[in-house]
Image: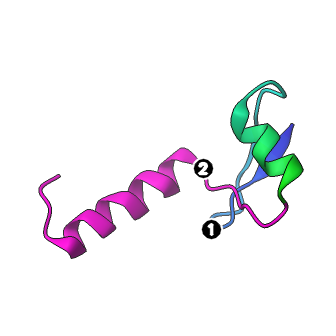
């Protein structure tokens, strides 16, 4: 399955048997973010909340 990142518009290939692919197919409200964008968002959120890492 091909999925496009919501933020950077990078197109990734996801295994059809992966739970993420099933979630994206069955629930259109869910969006995909590539691992780099996901890590960047997680780091900024932790920084904003005052957590270490």
Magenta includes 12? no
- Residue segment shown in magenta: 28-53
Residue at 87% over, 36% down: 1
Q: How many marks?
A: 2
Q: Secondary structure at mark 2?
A: loop
Q: Which residue is mark 1?
A: 7
Q: How crowded is the residue under tag 2: few (<14 C-alpha within 10 Å), some, or many (20+)?
A: some
Q: Are marks 1 and 2 in contact (CB under 8 Å)?
A: yes
Q: Residue 45: horizontal and vertical position, in percent?
A: 32, 68
Q: Is residue 5 above or below residue 36?
A: below
Residue 9 in percent (x, y) is at 71, 62
Q: Residue at x 71, y 33 (%)?
A: 19
Q: Quadrant of residue 2?
A: top right
Residue 35, x across and y down, in percent: 53, 45
Inter-mark Cα distance, 1 to 2 = 8 Å
Give yes or no for residue 45 being in the magenta stretch.
yes
- Nearest the viewer among 44 and 11 is 44
Q: Residue at x 42, y 63 (%)?
A: 41
Residue at image location 62% in from the left, 68% down from the top:
7
Pointer 2: what residue? 34
Left or right placement of residue 20 versus residue 47 in this view: right
Image position of 4 with respect to 50: above or below = above
In which quadrant of the rendered view does residue 46 lie? bottom left
Residue 27, quarter of the rendered image: bottom right
Q: Is residue 52 left or right of residue 23?
A: left
């Amino acid at each position: 399955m091909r999925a496009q990142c919501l933020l950077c518009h990078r197109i990734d290939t996801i295994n059809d048997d992966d739970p993420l692919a099933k979630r994206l197919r069955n629930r259109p409200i869910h969006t995909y973010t590539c691992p780099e964008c996901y890590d960047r968002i997680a780091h900024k959120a932790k920084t904003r909340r005052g957590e270490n890492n």
